[in-house]
Amino acid sequence: MKQEVVLYPSPGMGHLVSLVELGKLILRHHPTFSITVLITKPPFDTGATAEYVARVASQVSAITFHELPPADLNVLNPNLELLIFEWLSLCKPHVSEALLSISEKARIKAFIMDFFCCTALEVARGMGIASYIFFTSGAGFLDIFFYFPELHKENPGSFTDLDRDLVVPGIPPFPPRIMPTVMQDKSQDVYDWCMYYASTMPKADGILVNTFEQLEPLALKALAANEFRPGVPMPKIYCVGPLITVGDADRSSEVLAWLDTQPEGSVVFLCFGSVGRLSATQIREIAIGLESQRQRFLWVVRSPPTEDPSRKFLPPADPDLDALLPEGFLERTSGRGMVVKNWAPQVAVLRHSAVGGFVTHCGWNSILESICAGVPMAAWPLYAEQESNAFMMVGALQLSVRLERDDNGFVKAEALARCLRELMETESGKRLRERTTVLKDGAAKALSEGGTSLKSLELLVKAWDQAPN
Ligand SMILES: O=c1ccn([C@@H]2O[C@H](COP(=O)(O)OP(=O)(O)O[C@H]3O[C@H](CO)[C@@H](O)[C@H](O)[C@H]3O)[C@@H](O)[C@H]2O)c(=O)[nH]1
């Protein structure tokens, strides 16, 4: 009978890509397995997923995508996180049907779900399937997340009202405002969802984290020592990263051809994840900042967020660069700057020898991709757990320069220009580059023969072999 590993990512490229990469890693080392990926397509899906899924399906025959039927959800709710969490919860019966149908033809060795999908944990456990959580962010944020129920107990009010640092094992004390907004306000439904996830995760047979030991030793040590919940047994942690995609360079010819004309290490890349969008005022301010200094740049620009509720969750229309950028900006920066609409082949860009710095929103995949390319960063977090990632990157991990923002998160042109100078021209930028290069080598070692992440994967597969089902 076929030996199947079933993966269940939550919607969105930032969550899908690393879990699919885990599937590829498993296949590389255990080619007799096959992989099924359960895909759910909420109405607010941007469409990028479908393209990616089609590409992987055509390239890797041992990976099959199984699309779940749509859930019955009212999409008028203005809060995207709440929509996603409710959607995934409503998908539970479809997951059950899918697992049943797969198990008729194959032996399911393991079911590995994104941490946002852990409403499906009880379904798989009920069927006697070994069930694991895949954590798409780093160990530092996993520390915060694991400790969240304790933080909840320790702090009777909302975190928004708290003006002292929080203390969590494995990471330096931090101000509550760096937690994702969904984990700050106790009166919000999304807060209850986060509590549910944090309380449910320990019930899994193990937790896989997309990081590697050399990158986050202290955060991982705290996880291994189980310093989080007195009296609550914690599952084993499998550190299997960095899992990043090799990217799709085909769409890139224009961008890569332009980079080919630039001197080595001279270009700053500015890109804000798969869905990050900035206001029109902020886009203009970036342009002023870029023009005011001499760094070469490659900048991915998206249309500003829309206030129109009927378009809120649709893919962004192409940005109108003439309206968004200062008049004559493109002409004046021509040769030393390139602006790309909506999307650039990020992995290929970061690996291009002309790129010397990355202004990033601090999505975890972007951070790992930058490390694996040896490119130091400037942290410009926007939403989700990106503030926590930025806090770690600038502080404990020392991989990023600080980018000054005002209380509303707005970055002034002078602050951007200063930050780019620090990143590209100073001794501290040079030190970051050296540290990133060391970690780049460490990342490659972690996933090669005898490396820590590969050993972790082997322990995981061994656990499946020993499981009773
Ligand atoms: O122009 C672009 C923009 C993005 N990407 C790719 O898209 C992915 C983006 O992933 P990530 O950097 O993690 O950002 P998000 O898409 O914003 O990811 C979500 O999921 C991550 C993993 O949980 C979280 O860390 C983030 O905060 C959350 O927003 C990466 O592989 C990028 O290479 C491109 O290739 N080109």
Image (cartoon, rainbow, N blue to C red):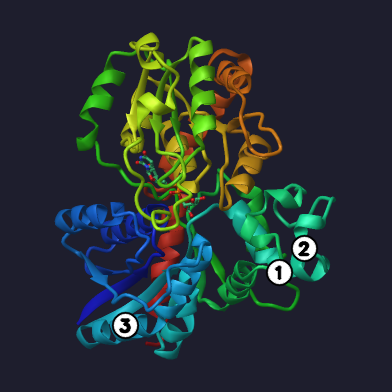
Q: Vertical placement of 346 versus 432: above or below? A: below
**Cα–Cα span, label 3 and label 2:** 39 Å
**Along the horizontal axis of the image, is 275 left or right of 183?**
left
Q: Can you give x and y, in whole percent of width and height, for residue 180 in the image?
A: 63, 54
Q: Vertical placement of 371 versus 388: above or below? A: above
User: Within 10 Å of the Cα at label 3, are there few (<14), some (14-19), or many (20+) other Cα atoms?
Assistant: many
Q: Nearer the viewer, residue 420 or 399?
A: 420
Q: Which marked residue is nearer to the observer: mark 3 or mark 2?
A: 2
> Disc 1, disc 2: CB below 8 Å?
yes
Give the amino acid type for the residue marked by disc 3 in the picture. Leu
- Identify which residue is drawn at 35% across, 80% down: 95
Q: Can you give x and y, in whole percent of width and height, for residue 112 in the image?
A: 41, 70
State the quadrant of the C terminus: bottom left
- Tell me, yes or no, if residue 238 can be seen here: no
Q: Which marked residue is nearer to the observer: mark 1 or mark 2?
A: 1
Residue 147's label in the rendered image is none
Residue at mark 2: 158
**Cα–Cα span, label 1 and label 2:** 8 Å
Give the amino acid type for the residue marked by disc 2 in the picture. Ser
Q: Vertical placement of 89 versus 133: above or below? A: below
**Cα–Cα span, label 1 and label 3:** 35 Å
State the quadrant of the N terminus: bottom left
User: Within 10 Å of the Cα at label 1, are there few (<14), some (14-19), or many (20+) other Cα atoms?
Assistant: few
Residue 267, picture quadrant: top left
Residue at mark 3: 99
Give the amino acid type for the residue marked by disc 1 in the picture. Ser
Q: Earlier in the sequence, mark 3 or mark 2?
A: 3
Q: Secondary structure at mark 2?
A: loop
Q: Nearer the viewer, residue 234 or 281?
A: 281
**Along the horizontal axis of the image, is 389 left or right of 445?**
right
